[in-house]
Image: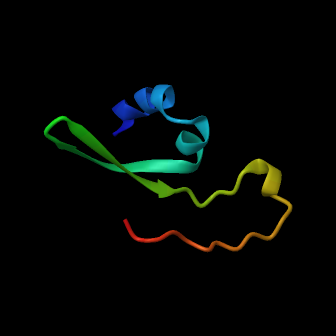
Amino acid sequence: MENYIELLKLILPELIVEHFDLVNTKIEQEKMHLFFEEKSTPPKEYNNRQLVSKGFLNE
């Protein structure tokens, strides 16, 4: 999946690539499905705050 990182930087917003890890890809016919997992590191500007994760919904 490391091969996809440079491509993702070209087509996705920078925040997605910075704050999420690509964990899986799936190709069906002419479509590519990308699966991301949120990184557990907060953005630098929030280092001095206590953050509470609310999580995400299932796929």
Q: Quadrant of residue 1?
A: top left
How many marks are shown on the rendered structure?
Answer: 0
Relative horizontal placement of residue 49, taking residue 37 as reference (left or right): right
Task: Look at the picture and state if 41 lies above or below 12.
Answer: below
Please give left or right for residue 6 compared with residue 14 in the image: left
Q: Residue at x 44, y 32 (%)?
A: 8
- Please give left or right for residue 51 compared with residue 27 in the image: right
Q: Nearer the viewer, residue 29 or 43?
A: 29
Q: Residue at x 72, y 51 (%)?
A: 43
Q: Closest to the observer: 49 or 30? A: 30
Query: What sort of colour scheme is used for the picture?
Result: rainbow
Q: Which corner quadrant of the image does residue 40 belong to?
A: bottom right
Q: Residue at x 61, y 42 (%)?
A: 15
> Which quadrant would the C terminus be assigned to in this image?
bottom left
Residue 46 in picture, x, y percent from top left: 80, 57
- Residue 35 vs 14, above or below: the answer is below
Residue 33 placed where, x, y %?
A: 29, 46
Q: Residue furthest right?
A: 48
Q: Which is more toward the observer, 59 or 53?
A: 59
Q: Which residue does the image show at 74% across and 69% down from the upper left?
A: 51
Q: Residue furthest front?
A: 30
